[in-house]
Structures are given as C-alpha cells and as structure tokens.
Image (tube, rainbow, N blue to C red):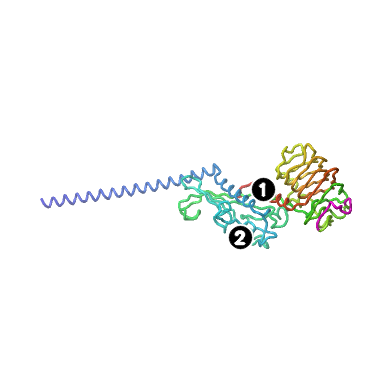
Amino acid sequence: MHLKSSREKNRSNAAQAGFVLMYVMYVVLAVGLFIAGATVFMSNSIHRSRVELRRNGQVMNVARAGLADAVNWFKSRATQPVRSNGTSYSFPDQAFEPLSDVDPKKNYTIDESIGIVKEYAITDDNLLWARYEVKKQVDDNSSDPSQTDTSAVHDISHELARGSAGEGLAWYVQSQAYVYVRRDENAAYNVAPNQVIESLAMAEEILAISIKRPAESAIICGKASAISIGSNARITGMPNGFAVTYLAGTGTPSPSAAPASVTGSPSAYLSLPDTMYFDDCHSVFGVTQAELKSLASISVSSVAGLPSAMPSMAVIYINGNATFTPSRPLAGGGILFVNGDLTIQANSNALFSGFVYVTGRVYQYAPSLISGMVFAHNGYTISGANDVSQVEYSPSVLNTVRNQLCQYQEAKAPYVVH
C-alpha cells in the first residue's frame, strides 16, 4: 500500500509540473503574441499616420510655420532692414541671429546654436510631434562663398542686384520640418526610441523696401532749370539737411540765390555731380518699379481710385498723373509713388507725412505741407498766393516710414526644396 501511494503521488506531482509548464508556455506565447500584435499595431499606426500626414499636408504646414516664424523675426527687429553692413557683425549672414528668451514674445528658439528651432505636439496623446529648424549661417563665408551653407539663411541682396552682400534687402530663408514619434521626451527627436516618420524642407525669398537718397534734403530734383520757387513757398532742410538738392549740369533753380524762406544746413542749395547723384527707383527703393507696385498696399491708376479716407501709413502707388483738388485733397502718410506728374491744387489743404517719389514733375500750391522728403525727376514748382506752400525735411518721419513700411515681404512664394 505504501509503495502504491508513493507512485500515485509521484504521478500527481508530475502531472502538476506538466500543467504548470504548459501554463507558463501558454502565458509566454500569449505575451509574445500580444507584443507582436502591439508592434504590428504600432507599425500600422505609424504607417497610417505617415499616410495621413502626407495626405493632409501636416509636414508642409510645419515647414510653413518655420518660414512664418523666420519672417516674423526679421520684421520684429528694431533696425530695418536687417543687415550686417555698418554693424559689428563680421560677415554678411551673421545678422540673422535668433536668441532664446524667458519672454515668450521674444523667445525664437530652443537651440541658439542652430537658429530658429521649435517643437510642439501634433496629437492629443502627445505621441506625434512637430519640429522645425531655420538654420543660421555658422561659418564666415565673406571671403569664400563656397563656405556658405545653402540650407541656412543667407543674404542674397547682391544676387538679386539689391546692392552688396550684407545690405539685408533680400534674404533666402529655408525651413526644415520633421514629424516624429516621441516615445522618450529626454531623447532627441531623431534618437531611438524616438522615430522621424516625415521630413520636408521649404524655402522662400523675402524682400525689403529701402529708402536711400543721395543727400539729406527736403527736395531732390534731377533738373535744376525746372525748379521754380515762388512767393509764399517755404522749404526747410534745417537743422541737418539741405532745402533743395539737384543734379549738377542741369541749370540753376529759380531764383538762383535761395530766398529767405528756403533754409538748410550747411546750405540751402546743394549741387551734386552725376557720380554722386541718383534718383532711379531701384537705387532709391532697392526694388524695381514693378516690384514696388506689387508690394504697395494701394495701387491705382488715378486719384479717383484712392480710398476716401487715406491711411496714415501705407505704400501708395499711382500709375499715372495724380491731381489732388479741394474736393480730393492729398492726406495721410507713408510712401507715395506717382508714375507721372503730381499736382497739388490751390486751396486743397494738402497734408502728407512721408516719402514722396514722382517720376515726372511736381506742382505744389498753397495751403499745403509735405513733411519728410520729395523726389522729383523732371522739376518742381512751388508757390502760394494768400497762404503758405511748404516742404520740410524730417528725419523722424522718414525713420517712422522705414520702420513701419520697409518690412520684409515675400518676393518668391514658398516652394518645396526636398
């Protein structure tokens, strides 16, 4: 009996051991199937996300966000345009230098060594993340253009005939976008277990309007013999500018000696040789006439097309002669470009603050006041009968125009690089 009981006990233990072994094997198999299934699910989920990203253009939106951030950086600089020339920067592209800041409005990057870098979650579960990089130029490429990192932001003023390298009138901007699976927030976006699933680079060219002039002067005219200063005309260049500047060899203004109402420092009149004089659109604004027209906030063919309430600060382009009358007076401010003659009739009470550029001739009668500067290619007639007709040079007005209107805008629409 004892021997039989012992054998039965051994058989029972063996059966239990076999059951446990089978159970363990089942659990291991189930866990393995679960992991495999989860891996397949994750792989399929990532694949679906990739397809979804492509279909909805998510990664393109991330790249566009980088471009927009870069343009906003350029526009937010206190000095416009953003340039290296005349500054402490050692090479042309160094002016693009985004910094991090505790103030969210001033914080443009999470990595100053790269340039503008931002990351943000795309999905609510914080699994999919976006990252864009707008790289700055690290190496001094001034003496060797081959050192230029073509994927980084660089000054292309000289390439687009906007002046020398470093003028800051035109920039190439590229944004590299990534969409990645973020499994470890302490690891870089491209370091396992994180995984980049989409990437795209987009670029654009931005352009700024400049305001250059051959002299600091209330009036600049290319034809001295067609300058007529009549009674009740007041032209003020004081305290640090000339009243009238003209191209030498084109005659003399009338009167040849500046009247008492025409004042400037160090003199009322300034005659410039053609080697120093310029008044063409490209030299003054840094853009062609067609480009300026496309950048204008208001572009019309006559005064009749202007809004009834003129803006206080805008780029206004009139393609043709412009005649302002008592019922339609010149008002507002900014940049006024007239592709033709400009006439300000008597009793129209004109009041304009800004930069006026006229390809033809200017006829200005009283009462009227233009504060800032006026370019007139073919002549300037200014006089008043019972009131004053006035032009005053104002650096502060020109600075306001420069800071508010000479902002960067798209010269070439964003396009995919790769």
Residue type highlighted by circle 1: Gln
Q: Is residue 90 above or below residue 243?
A: below
Q: Nearer the viewer, mark 1 or mark 2?
A: 1
In percent of width and height, residue 61 lies at 57, 45
In percent of the image, x 63 and y 51: which residue is there? 76
* Left or right: 378 in relation to 56: right
Return the residue nearer the eye: 282 or 342: 342
x, y (%) of residue 36? 40, 47
Secondary structure at numbered mark 2: loop
Q: Answer left or right for 351 relative to 104.
A: right
Q: Where are the magenta residues, as a range?
A: 253-265
Question: What residue is shown with label 2?
Answer: 138
Q: Amino acid at mark 2?
A: Val
Q: Residues within 10 Å of mark 1 (few under 14, many from 20)?
A: some
Decide which of tag 1 and tag 2 comes sooner along the chain.
2
Q: Residue at 47% of width from left, 55% of height from top?
A: 186
Q: Nearer the viewer, residue 103 or 93?
A: 103
Q: Which mark is residue 181?
A: none
Residue at the disc numbered 1: 409
Q: Secondary structure at mark 1?
A: strand
